[in-house]
């Protein structure tokens, strides 16, 4: 199975679950246009694998879907948290570089409150945009040497 994007997700405020959109415009040194987490820093785009979301579903948490963990890109077919920092990958029309694996969950995280746990701090990754472009569900993800 090849790696692909299963959803592009956006939110207007930080700490909120994100909502799926048809496609997103990703801007160099910024991230997803219109997203609360975008900006000139090292965590422009957040990615989480559907496989990680499935682990939470297996724990008995009902009703989980793309964007619930505030990830910009939900993926399938790639173990994101095993990618070393510095890995470059082509996602849709964009070129991204992995800058961080996992994160410290801030207290009062809406996701943890609503779902009881947040897998993003353990298995989510963050990237910066090196080459901008559009990403939509179904786009492939390729590691660039």
Image (tube, grey):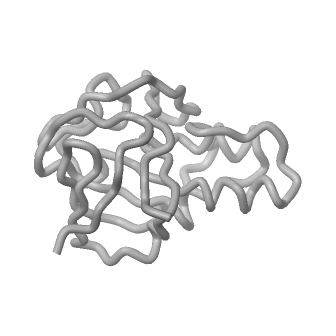
Q: Is the C terminus in the top left, top right, bottom left or bottom right quadrant? A: bottom left
The answer to whether residue 1 is above or below residue 66 is below
Tell me residue 32's x, y (percent). Answer: 29, 33
Q: In which quarter of the image is residue 98?
A: bottom left
Q: Which of 5 and 106 is in front in this view?
A: 5
Tell me residue 77's x, y (percent). Answer: 50, 63
Please give left or right for residue 66 compared with residue 96 in the image.
Answer: right
| Residue drawn where x is 73% and y is 41% of the image | 64
The answer to whether residue 47 is above or below residue 24 is below
Tell me residue 4's x, y (percent). Answer: 43, 52
In the displayed image of the protein, which residue is found farthest to the right? Answer: 60
Q: Quadrant of residue 108?
A: top right
| Residue drawn where x is 43% and y is 22% of the image | 12
| Residue drawn where x is 50% and y is 43% of the image | 6
Tell me residue 125's x, y (percent). Answer: 41, 60
Q: Which of 117 and 143 is in front in this view?
A: 143
Please give left or right for residue 78 compared with residue 44 in the image.
Answer: right
Query: What is the count of numbered marks?
Result: 0
Q: Which of 108 and 45 is in front in this view?
A: 45
| Residue drawn where x is 54% and y is 50% of the image | 106
């Amino acid at each position: 199975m090849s790696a692909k994007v299963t959803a592009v997700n956006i939110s207007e405020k930080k700490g909120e679950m994100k909502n799926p959109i048809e496609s997103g415009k990703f801007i160099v040194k910024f991230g997803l246009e219109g997203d609360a987490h975008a900006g000139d820093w090292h965590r422009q785009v957040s990615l989480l694998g559907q496989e990680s979301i499935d682990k939470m579903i297996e724990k008995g948490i009902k009703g989980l879907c793309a964007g619930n963990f505030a990830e910009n890109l939900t993926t399938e077919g790639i173990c994101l948290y095993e990618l070393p920092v510095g890995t470059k990958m082509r996602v849709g029309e964009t070129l991204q570089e992995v800058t961080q694996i996992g994160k410290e969950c801030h207290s009062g995280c809406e996701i943890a409150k609503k779902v009881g746990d947040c897998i993003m701090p353990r298995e989510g990754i963050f990237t910066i945009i090196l080459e901008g472009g559009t990403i939509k569900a179904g786009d492939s993800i390729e590691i660039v040497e």
